[in-house]
Image (spheres, rainbow, N blue to C red):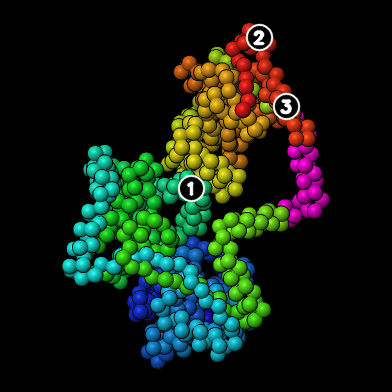
Amino acid sequence: MFDHIPDDPDLRRAWNALALGMEHAEVFFTYEWSVAVERAYKGRLTLLLVLGYDDAGLAGVAALTRKRTGELVFLTADTADYCDFLCASSLRRQFVFAVLSELKARKVGTAVFTNLPADSHSVSALWEAGSRTGYCLHMRGAYVCAQVRLGSGEERYSLKQSVLAKKRLRKNFRELASRGTVLLEHETEWSDIRSLLPQFARAHIARFLETGKKSSLICPERRAFLEELGDELSRSGWIVFSRLVVGKVTAAWNYGFRFAGSWFWYQPTMNDCYRDLSPGHCLLAKIVEQACDSHDLDVVDLGLGAEGYKERFANSSRRTLYCEVNGSRIRHWRTIARYRAATIARASPSLETWIRMMISTLGKVREMLATEGIWGMLRRAGQRVRRLLFSHDKLLVFEWRAGARTPDTSGIRLVPLDSDALGAAALQYGNDPVRLRFFMRSAQRLRSGDGQGFVLMTADGTPVHFCWAKECEGFYVKELDRTLRGLCENTVIIFDCLTPEAARGHGYFQQAISLLARQLNSQGVAAWIFRCEADLTEFRDSEKSGFHHKFTLGRRRILFFKRISDSLPTVKSHQEHKLSAV
């Protein structure tokens, strides 16, 4: 038993020999993979390494870790598509029994073995070892991993032709070729891969933001893991970092592996500029085509995830299992009941949505209780009810005046926001939930074209402020629940501004909106911005930036009745600025 993985060349060789001797050898089973996890997540792991020996030397490896909730899991469970007990098939039952016996002796109540291949000899070994050690075992299906089985020479040729014959794929390749020479490049040297990882991470994060999800690469430990893994696997030639390059621009990436006859599609992403041409799909097609010509390969494994594009290539699949062993029968039956309830809920999409909503609400209530206490939560609820029944909301509208005195903007620049800049910003600031929601909104606006985003950059390229601009006509004001109509032509509203907490206190907000207003004014467009009346700080900031109060938009609510209470200018321009709310 070890609480760390020894840095021992002999252990490395013996461990990898076991991995290669498994019924289905996987790169996830290697010494290098486990070491990369341990190094990247150091400080967050409680490692338990079980090594089994016989007369011939190392006979079994089980790398486990204890989660915060108390149960033991495979060390690689959060990073590997397949996890297993490493041992020769003939000794698997003995080794799995020895591992569970050790867990029982250490009074481990629950162990969860996820991503266990359904075709592994460990499945039957766990059933037998569970009953012999007194553990209750619950096993269910987890994921289905799509695969492209290459087959014999004729089957490879047929597969290759079927991939190349796809009409949509040929059309996308022609369009990509019209934008530049299309190349498939594979990097296997760590020095080359390391220089490409930052751009890959930015693209991966931006892609996830578009779908309202959080990329795993926002987490610094995950990025550290990919770096450690790339460094380790490159020494054995097992990593292949693939790129589809159009001209001089990378359109798609795949952080993948070639190991023991398998080419693994592990972590792909694409350049948002080419999303209409499905560059990730094109990259995968090229990999399958190239794999058909490589006689040392038997399969292209597409890994976890039920993305639709995988089904267009897959001709086979491999199932994984979720296995939970419990020392308590009460916990065991609770696990089964929870699983069956979830199965019933999934049969009804509306019921599943309601349950997820209730779970989310209860989570928020628990979080609020922990941070504010019962009285704080009740006070907040009371304020919300009062606001729903009786409220008077006001927004102050400011207009930038040409020639107004503006803050010093030397050493900084305001540039349009694109997916690469957004990915870089989320990489730097995305750990905070508030900022992450802002980046998700921004990514979705970039994709839909709903407004134009801008980012304020310092001289060294650090993003320090973000803002959006959109035409006033048809602008929806969320704070007042109304859409602006007929207010003013050739007017743009600056909205949804964000200065990350680490960049506050330097006047970046004033500088950004001043630069943007000046830019809009040079195009013959008036720049407006609105701030909440209660926030005097933002009121002062707006005036420091050359903005001056023009009028006020308001709304009164009494019980269930709403009434507009605008304070429009009384000057001549009042006739030109009529407002209607929808």
Q: Which residue is mark 2?
A: 571
Q: Which residue is mark 3?
A: 563
Q: CA distance from mark 2 to mark 1?
A: 46 Å
User: Does the stretch in magenta take in 567?
Assistant: no
Going from the N terminus, do you reach mark 3 or mark 2 first? 3
Q: Amino acid at mark 3?
A: Arg
Earlier in the chain: of badge 2 and badge 1, it is: 1
The residue sitting at 52% across, 44% down in the picture is 440
Residue density around tag 2, few if under 14, some if 14–19, many if 20 or more, within 10 Å: few
Q: Which residues are magenta?
A: 368-392
Q: Residue at x 27, y 60 (%)?
A: 288
**Crowd around label 3: few <14 · some 14–19 · many ≥20 (10 Å):** few
Q: Position of residue 397 (x, y in %)?
A: 64, 22
Cβ–Cβ below 8 Å for labels 3 and 1? Answer: no
Task: Tell me the SS state at disc 1.
Answer: loop
User: In this figure, which residue is indicated by the disc labeled 1?
Assistant: 211
